[in-house]
């Protein structure tokens, strides 16, 4: 059986706009049917040959690494598995299409039935805790697929959702009946979302938090949760999915320093209390 480091293949079956900013791509194929995602935030890493690469999918990433300079190695982009139907061998992935910038968003916009792409994974880390009183799920469009998968898993169990989207036309794409506060972008991405979550406060009880999206928002909400309210770290799953002005390569390369700096600032702020 293929492991997580083996490149697998997915064929585009169909695409459809879930909201004006979010494009759902349905993939199929035997490799898709063989996936066993363990978490609601399970993700895959799509493989893109960089511009000018003398190869196209299908390829063996390990062989490419041996054969070519680093500049020609495949570039990865991370995407949540919104849903998987193993029997039908289909998987839905929702792509934020953010203008004409970026590799993956632009690829999805131009994807047509019959196209194939390679991917690695799945990885993942978090699922709702069945014993918790309440889940608070917070994110922007990039986190909507993971929030949607968590809501599917939660069913009727209590959840409060805060999602930032570009405006009223971009609301939608999450399970009907969920308690969702739609926040409209105002200023920099994430700013309005931080304000909304702060204004709502920290609910009482045994609460689990899932908070993902633009890195700048994560910084502010970590401070809100850990410094201002002393929420237990193991009750919170929080990280930046992307960063303003950075490709995923640049963001992943700088993420460790970004997190270390945030943690140091939080530690100083906590000592001062
Ligand atoms: C675990 C995980 C799961 C993720 N799941 C999803 C998912 O299901 N769907 C999804 O769409 N994204 C998801 N993301 C985020 C996604 O990997 C990044 O947004 C990625 O940078 C998009 O690649 P790109 O090639 O389109 O843009 P890049 O080439 O990486 O970036 C080009 C430019 O676009 C900007 N940019 C990147 N993402 C966004 C955005 N969302 N909105 C506005 N501008 C942006 C960058 O800041 C940069 O300036 C996930 C990330 C992680 C770590």
Image: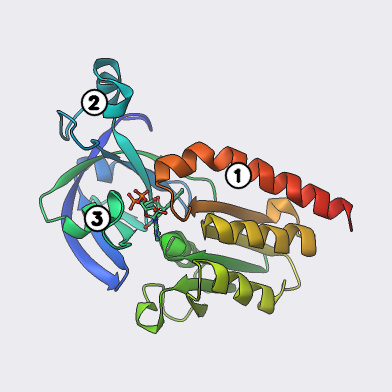
Residue drawn at (25%, 70%), measured in percent from left and top?
17
- Badge 3 vs badge 2, beta-carbon distance below 8 Å: no
Q: Position of residue 124 (x, y in %)?
A: 48, 45
Bin the neighbour count of mark 3 within 10 Å (Cα to Cα): few under 14, some 14-19, many 20 and up: some
> Where residue 76 sits in the image (x, y, percent)?
34, 39
Quarter location, residue 206:
bottom right
Q: Nearer the viewer, mark 3 or mark 2?
A: 3
Is label 1 in a helix, a strand or a loop? helix
Q: Which residue is mark 2?
A: 60
Local secondary structure at mark 2: loop
> Is the residue 172 above or below the residue 114 in the image?
below
- Per the image, the residue denoted by label 3 is 106
The residue positioned 47% from the left and 65% from the top of the image is 140
In the picture of the structure, the residue carrying the numbered disc 1 is: 258
Q: Is residue 116 left or right of residue 209?
A: left
Q: Quadrant of the C terminus?
A: bottom right
- Whether residue 131 is visible here, answered yes or no, is no
Classify mark 3: helix, strand or loop.
Answer: helix
Q: Residues within 10 Å of mark 1 (few under 14, many from 20)?
A: some
As displayed, is residue 176 above or below residue 268? below
Q: From this view, report whether residue 65 is shown above or below residue 83.
A: above
């Amino acid at each position: 059986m293929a492991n997580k480091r083996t490149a697998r293949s997915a064929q585009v079956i169909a695409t459809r706009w879930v909201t004006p900013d979010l494009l759902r791509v349905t993939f199929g194929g035997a490799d898709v049917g063989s996936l066993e995602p363990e978490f609601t935030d399970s993700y895959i890493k799509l493989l893109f040959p960089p511009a000018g690469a003398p190869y196209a999918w299908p390829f063996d990433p390990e062989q490419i690494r041996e054969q070519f300079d680093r500049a020609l190695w495949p570039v990865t982009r991370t995407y949540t598995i919104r849903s998987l139907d193993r029997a039908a061998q289909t998987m839905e992935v929702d792509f934020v299409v953010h203008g004409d910038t970026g590799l993956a968003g632009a690829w999805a916009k131009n994807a047509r039935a019959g196209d194939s792409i390679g991917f690695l994974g799945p990885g993942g880390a978090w699922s709702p805790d069945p014993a918790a009183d309440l889940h608070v799920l917070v994110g922007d469009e990039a986190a909507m697929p993971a929030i949607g998968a968590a809501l599917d898993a939660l069913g009727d169990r209590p959840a409060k959702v805060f999602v930032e989207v570009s405006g009223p036309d971009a609301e939608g794409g999450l399970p009907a009946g969920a308690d969702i506060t739609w926040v409209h972008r105002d200023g920099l991405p994430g700013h309005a979302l931080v304000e909304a979550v702060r204004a709502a406060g920290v609910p009482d009880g045994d609460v689990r938090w899932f908070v993902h999206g633009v890195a700048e928002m994560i910084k502010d909400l970590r401070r809100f949760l850990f410094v201002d309210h002393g929420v237990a770290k193991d009750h919170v799953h929080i990280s930046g999915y992307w960063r303003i002005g950075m490709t995923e390569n640049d963001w992943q390369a700088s993420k460790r320093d970004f997190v270390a700096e945030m943690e140091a600032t939080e530690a100083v702020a906590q000592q001062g209390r």
